Amino acid sequence: MPKVVIDGIEIEVPPGTTILNAAQRVGVEIPVFCYHPYLKPAGICRMCLVEVEGMPRLLPACITEVQDGWEIYTNSDRVKDAREWLLEFVLVNHPLECPICDEAGECELQNFVFKFGEPRKRLYDEPFKYPTRYLGPLIVHQMNRCVLCRRCVRFSDEAMGGTDWGVYERGYRTIVGPYERDVFAQKYTFNMEALCPVGAITSNIYRYKTRIWKLDFTNSVCAHCEVGCWLDLGERDGQLLKVLHRRGYPSPWICDKGGYGFEYVNHSERITVPLRREGNRLRGVTTDEALEFVAGRLKGLVESGGKVAALVSPHLTCEDYLLMGSFMKEVVGSDYLDYRLYGGNTYPERPAVDSLEGVEKAEAYLVVGEDLSVHHPVLALSVAKGCKEGRASLYLIVTGDSFLFKFAAEHANPLPGKEEKVLEALASVLGGKDYASLLEGTEVSEDTLKAMAQGLQEKKPLIIGGSRLTPEGRVLLKGVGERLGITPLFLDWGSNSKGAFQMGFWSPGGESVEDILNKCVSGEIKGLFVSSMDLFRDYPNGTLVKEALSNLDFLVVHDMFFTETVAYSDCYLPATSFAEDGGTVVNMFWEAKKRNRAFKPKDESMPLWQVALGLSRKWGRPLGDFGTVEDVTPLVRERLSQVVEAPSTLGGVKAAHLKGDIPALFEYPFYRAGMRTDFCNAFVQLVPEPYVTLNPEYGDELGFKNGDIVIMEVDGNQFRMKLFFRDEVPRGGAIVSRGFSDFPITRALKGLWYRGIELRAAKE
Amino acid sequence: MKTVAEHTERRTYTLNMGPQHPSTHGVLRVILELEGETIVDARPVVGYLHRGTEKLAESKTYQQVSPLIDRLDYLACPAYNFAYCLAVEKLLGVEVPPRAKYIRVILAELARIASHLIWLGSHAMDIGAVTVFLYTFREREITYELLEMAAGVRMHQSYFVVGGVRWDLPEGFIPKLREFLDILPSKIQEYENLLTKNKIWRMRTEGLGVLSREDAIALGATGPMLRGSGVEWDIRKAYPYSGYGEFEFDIPTGRNGDVYDRYLVRMEEMRQSRRIILQALEKLPDGPIHAMEGKLYFPDPDWVRGEHRDIAALIHQFKLVVEGFHPPKGEVYQSIEAPKGELGFYIVCDGSPKPYRLRIRLPSLMNLQTLPLLSRGHKVADLVAIIGTLDIVLGDVDK
């Protein structure tokens, strides 16, 4: 093991350690611009130059590996001069924008100049000026401020698999940025903004709002998906203004939903007082009145023999599920609870790996039934990491995957609705049985499947079962896993479905949401409590929802905004966002994480557990004495340590109705997935209205052009939408976007996410 | 049965003096235990001007603390700034450039003269010699004008910054200062003519408030209180700072430790201060007035936002305003000879741009401890003279 002396401190390091890493071990600080702990070191910026005894030139510490016996000086006169002069050169063209630059306060250039530079530079000349580019509602690119560290380009290449963000031109005219696009919003752009050491890439959402040191940061967990990335919420005066991702685990990266998808917290349309229906109007009332009213009506319903159900969003905290579940089961005496409002009928299963690190260690991946980059974006990055480095092979059986296919060794792109057929075929191949017949009508070739099977048998894969899988699909996948000796990792919708499941927020009889809604239609369930979700937006059966809600005697909605569901309600209770209450959430690896609240709930907003507590008090059977959410946490913890068995759900979901010419998959665009993203202004700007996508060749065949306006007809319902050509759509199928609360796309669905549609050109 | 003697046993009468009182030099409260007119005990109660300076300093950067320090002894602001800046510079291990050093000495001694002038005026006025007050304020007005020329402000200048002085002396400063120093001896003589051989003055001040050598040292009295009792102790000679070692000056001491002696000591100190200023003016070199340009104090405004704007200067300005400089971790104690006594700053730094703890050793507060001892046995009317001789400023007592 080589021994080196750094600034007089001796240390022994494993071979292959760079000078920078060795210095970090002893606590010696070396300034760096282009180095980032989670990107491969590049040696571009030369800020880390250090002096080594006997070497004629200064060496870059981030890429030079130490040799035995070296004496390294990180603060000698030569090094100091080098840093000073380098900063002088970097500042030559740097604009005098500190007073208006958002990065000021966390700007690495500022910090280095203050520490190592001189207060005056010697060159006076006109700087070369670049235009400012507003690349869409998410980021602003100001090339004037760029120091050409290439962190953004390296991130785009290494982690995102290459987008058109690159370095162009050369010399003093070098420019970094997207080549063709005017809008750059590629799901992980937040990381590029976070990586940029200066204010060249800044957030458009945060622009000019405040200074970074005026924000109070609270630790919390993202509420959009199950990966549960750690966030630091920056709050000032009760407004959530910025979000930072400062921890390197579970992943150093975070997706745009986590980084930019919080604008709904301070949305101007948020309703923060309870409302009660009087005739055709909803009138504002006090919390006391509202809770009294709801408890009274529910009690009346129960006493007259009607049933009550509760449907809540899978994005809430365990405390919410625990207390609401207790209220429903013990006080109301109801058995109809569910959180799977995105559809589907599967319960969470214990994971096969326990962390993203475990995911990254795999030598092969089989991903079935979900575009990971939409619903679990950080997981997609982890899967891509190994593939990018050539360590792992990726096999996809996903309709319309938009990101991972770039890294895939074998990519099966089945027609919408045929993913599980292909999975069955794969099982057959692995079992040595006939599979060709199974592949008919799926648009997947036999060769692809054969190669996939071969590859899977060579290296032990990590099998990831996406959220689209039905219970039958899961069984199939488990079968495949058994053959290969692997337990699959199953993914669910929402960010805390594991928590909801563990807290028991599901019907003991195994009823699905569809069953519950059917019972509402039939009149068996007379009262319904809905929390934090717009059923019309997300539940894949708009017609059933409408019938169910119209037939109810009493509907209570606990939400933040006036959604379509609220329009049917008899009482509206204002909800808090994830930033206003703490609690425990359980992520996809069944890890419990604690959220903290950044500021007090606005006006009369209450988290669900407080609503449950208030209702139980008004009912006359209080659940307990809980002041803050931390009082409920011990009960949650107790429940989390228990083992919960899920009922079998096979045969619960009906097969997809696929009559109609074109089989279509209804899937969320990335910027519309997640919690309440239709109230995030930036995302709404990016994806303002629903659209249909077709494979370019198929679209040509049908006689359409990219950008046409078409009418999509399903069951007599007509939807007027734009048509786009996308390469990732399988030929012969279509992918329709969903997740718009102001467009009734879910009326086209009947319980699952596939539907046969008819497309024709719209007459002008 | 009590005897007549026991009935009429001596009992003390408690009288409250202050905090609002024209002769307590501020908001000082003294609880007097009187036997007739004789003071049995005089207990000072302080805290009426407490503003939490030490605690406030913990939430401000090192440069932002300076205005707080100004307001401790508001009659000799430069001296207090001086001590604080020296303390932080000791922590940083920074030497200020020679020109800044001498400018600081000049202004600190000017502050000493100004402080002693107001001491003399108010002390004499309290005892009854009202005229002296008007005469000394005439001279003090000139010091205000001089300080305004240098710093732009008559009081609370914060003219000294960590690393040097804020800006250079303006053109007319030195001639005006020389003018002042020329007339000063005759003015001091004027005050002496009024007081030193004045029978009433001598009767009221001699033998009053005697502080013995041992008591002075034991109670921690410093400055003229200590030197009036015959102890030859001046920090400018004992631990020279900021170039004081290069100047020739004497330390006046008294013999009896009474009010009269302390009066003579302070009069002589004014003359010695003048001597030091004249020497400093001789030695004043040209050169920079900031150490570590741009790192401790703002760079030249012309470089930041003027014609010769520079991004590097802008960055330094920004970082200094928003964050401040980071001294290395450590603790430091630095004291100087302030006009009222030993002023010391103890700073604990944890590496952040704000002090972790700032502890101020205040001369007036320590000198005030001697009040009960000095006033026992004297009459109430003499108490005013004793308070005057302590030369306390309540900002300095209470921080």
Image (cartoon, coloured by chain):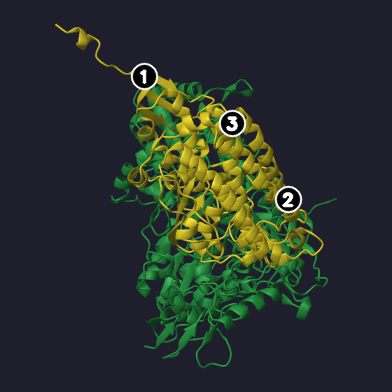
Chain colours: A green, B yellow
Q: Which chain is home to disc 2?
A: B
Q: Nearer the viewer, residue A29 or A528?
A: A29
Viewer-side label of 3, 2:
2
Q: Secondary structure at mark 3?
A: loop
Q: Nearer the viewer, residue A17 or B87?
A: B87
The answer to whether B306 appears left or right of A541 in the picture is right
Q: Is residue B210 above or below residue A475?
A: above
Q: Are marks 1 and 2 in contact (CB under 8 Å)?
A: no
**Label 1 sits on residue:** B14
Residue type at mark 1 is Thr
Picture quarter with the N terminus of chain A: bottom left
Return the disc, 1 or 2, that comes first in the chain's sequence. 1
Q: Is residue A111 visible?
A: yes
Mark 3: few/some/many CA within 10 Å (<14, 14-19, 20+): some
Q: Which chain is home to disc 1?
A: B
Viewer-side label of 1, 2:
2
The CA distance from mark 3 to mark 1 is 80 Å
Q: Are marks 3 and 2 in contact (CB under 8 Å)?
A: no
The circle drawn on residue B179 is 2
Residue type at mark 3 is Tyr
Question: Which quarter of the picture shows residue B243?
Answer: bottom right
Residue A80, x across and y down, in percent: 59, 78
